[in-house]
Image: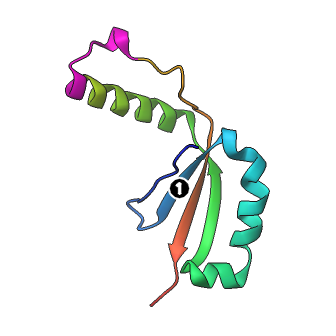
Amino acid sequence: MQQIQGKIDESNLYVIKLPQSLRQHFSKIFEDLDNPEVKERLNIDTYNVRVTSLEEVFNTLGEEEMSRENQDNLSANNFDDQDRELDQQQIEFKKLSD
């Protein structure tokens, strides 16, 4: 199973990127996120959903390629993105006020 990770962005929102391979679970995820008890338990005030832009895809690929070259000392010709899913849904969460 694919691991999903998130990060806090420059707007202080927690951002999770969901690959399209999980699309069959999206309705359940959003149903849960609309439940006030779940939102309170997860400390979520609001959430937004957006599709990853083409610019973000290129930036991510470029960063990963540079990182891989630095770590493995590989040339750009050996960069393998066959397993990469470029189409992603992004969810941004705003925490409840303390």
The amino acid type, in three-letter code, at marker 1 is: Ile
Task: Establish if 23 lies above or below 97.
Answer: above
Residue at the location (52% across, 73% down)?
94
**Within the magenta stretch, is there residue 29?**
no
- The image position of residue 80, as x and y in percent, is 44, 17
In the rendered view, tell whether residue 31 sits above or below residue 38.
Answer: above
Question: Principal SS element in the magenta part?
Answer: helix
Above/below status of 9 relative to 94: above
Residue drawn at 69 percent across, 71 percent down: 33
Task: Judge the density around disc 1: few (<14), some (14-19), many (≥20) Cα neighbours within 10 Å.
Answer: some
Across and down, in percent, residue 32 comes to 72, 70
User: Is 17 left, or right, of 64 in this rendering?
Assistant: right
Q: Nearer the viewer, residue 7 or 57?
A: 7
> What coloring was used for the rendering?
rainbow
Q: Is residue 35 left or right of residue 49?
A: right
**Residue 62, image x, y percentages:** 37, 28
Foreground residue among 11 and 93: 93
Q: Where 78 falls versus 42 (above or below)? A: above
**Extreme residue in the front direction:** 1
Residues 11 and 47: in front is 47
Residue holding disc 1: 16
Magenta run includes residue 71: yes
| Rendered-image quadrant of the N terminus | top right
Answer with left or right where residue 62 lies relative to residue 54.
left
Q: Residue at x 68, y 45 (%)?
A: 22
Part of the protein shown in magenta: 70-79
* Image point (44%, 91%), residue name: 98
- Quick one: SS at disc 1? strand
Please count the marks in the image.
1
